[in-house]
Amino acid sequence: MKRPQRGVALVLVLWVITLLAVIAGNFAFSMRNEAQIARNLTSTAQAKAIAEGGVQRAWLELLKPTSDPLRWRANGVEHSFTLSGAELKAVLSDESGKIDLNTASDALLKGLLVSTGLSEEASVSLLDALLDWRDTDKFKRLHGAEEDDYRAAGKNYVPSNGPFETVDELQRVLGMTPELYRKLAPALTVYSKQPGINTAVAAREVLLAIPGVNPAMVDQYVSQRQSLLASDQKAPTFAGAGVFATVSMGIPTYSVRCEVKLPDGTVFVRVVVARLAQDPSRPVVVLGWGDGEAEQMTGKQ
């Protein structure tokens, strides 16, 4: 073989080797990615299963006799424990202590918006948009939003003109932002069916939504309530609540928020809403469930 031909052959061989190296590298990278995806899916599935176990633990603790001093109460207090090597945080809440998106008074809903730091003007606009979403007509309120406004904003949906089916649905209201929704969601429900709130079980952020109250009043009441509950005494109604205080007379409805953290750092949150039934064979009737966002919980056991 002549020298030029040998040179061409060598170049071709080098190109083939380089090409094979690139293919092998891409294949190895692809396999690593697929392996990582498989590990992530496995971890998520494991976290979900453990979260379900944590939710069941919460219901079991709630169903213990009221005379049991270790019984978990639906008072928004965080309970930390471990299960299958994972760290869990569970919070039980009474839905009557939240603001109902469908039945709460306009003043209470506006108070909640203002309590998050929204300006008066922004609160009025968002309240009108919220009310336009849930009312049964297509007439736009002064600062609200109806079908034409959603179309103009480029949305591919329009107001339902009916009651909110879930709190998540609030995210679709024109003017709602993810950051604001995260602040509002813990204080809201669609299950209490009340115009006001049961202050005896309401969280601090809910009490701050009551028109006319201030943080000092709320903190004093919350401190008093915690002291009474610690000594197994009934918590009084918040005096500052006025007409916004109601006493739940229906079947108790509760929510459980269970956050799971695996040793590898995987985090999963399960949220379940249920009613307690009188049927021993089915003591808990699930009304809704979903995935929540990991966040720093408040309170301690």
Image (tube, helix red, strand yellow):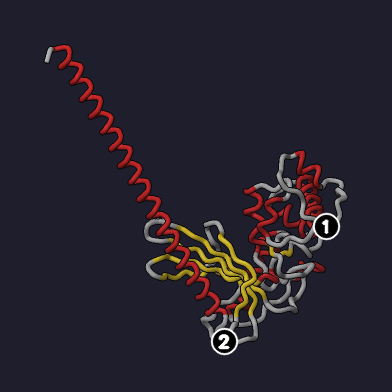
On the image, the x and y values in percent for residue 119 come to 74, 46
Given this view, does label 1 or label 2 mark the residue nearer the observer? 1
Who is closer to the viewer here, 151 or 184? 151
Q: Are circles 1 and 2 on residues that touch, CB within 8 Å?
A: no
Residue found at the far left of this picture? 1
Quadrant for residue 290, please give it: bottom right
Who is closer to the viewer here, 189 or 244? 189
- Residue 128 is left or right of residue 165, and the answer is right
Among numbered discs 1 and 2, the one appearing first in the sequence: 2
On the image, the x and y values in percent for residue 126 come to 76, 49
Q: Is residue 292 above or below residue 200?
A: above
Q: In the structure shown, which secondary structural element does the residue marked by tag 2 occupy?
A: loop
Quadrant for residue 77, please give it: bottom right
Q: In the structure shown, which secondary structural element does the residue marked by tag 1 occupy?
A: loop
Residue found at the far front of this picture? 1
Who is closer to the viewer here, 112 or 290? 290
Residue 46, disc: none
Residue 65, disc: 2
Please tell me which residue is depicted at 70% across the width and 48% down the height of the picture: 176
Please tell me which residue is depicted at 25% across the width and 25% down the height of the picture: 15
Please tell me which residue is depicted at 64% across the width and 82% down the height of the picture: 277
On the image, the x and y values in percent for residue 193 come to 76, 70
Q: Is residue 193 above or below residue 211?
A: below
For the residue carrying disc 1, how many other residues have a C-alpha within 10 Å: few (<14), some (14-19), or many (20+)? some
Does any portion of residue 254 appear in the rendered image?
yes
Quarter of the N terminus within the rendering = top left
Residue 135, disc: 1
Please tell me which residue is depicted at 64% across the width and 71% down the height of the picture: 287
**Hey, what amino acid is under mark 1?**
Asp
Does any portion of residue 212 appear in the rendered image?
no
For the residue carrying disc 2, how many other residues have a C-alpha within 10 Å: few (<14), some (14-19), or many (20+)? few
**Hey, what amino acid is under mark 2?**
Pro
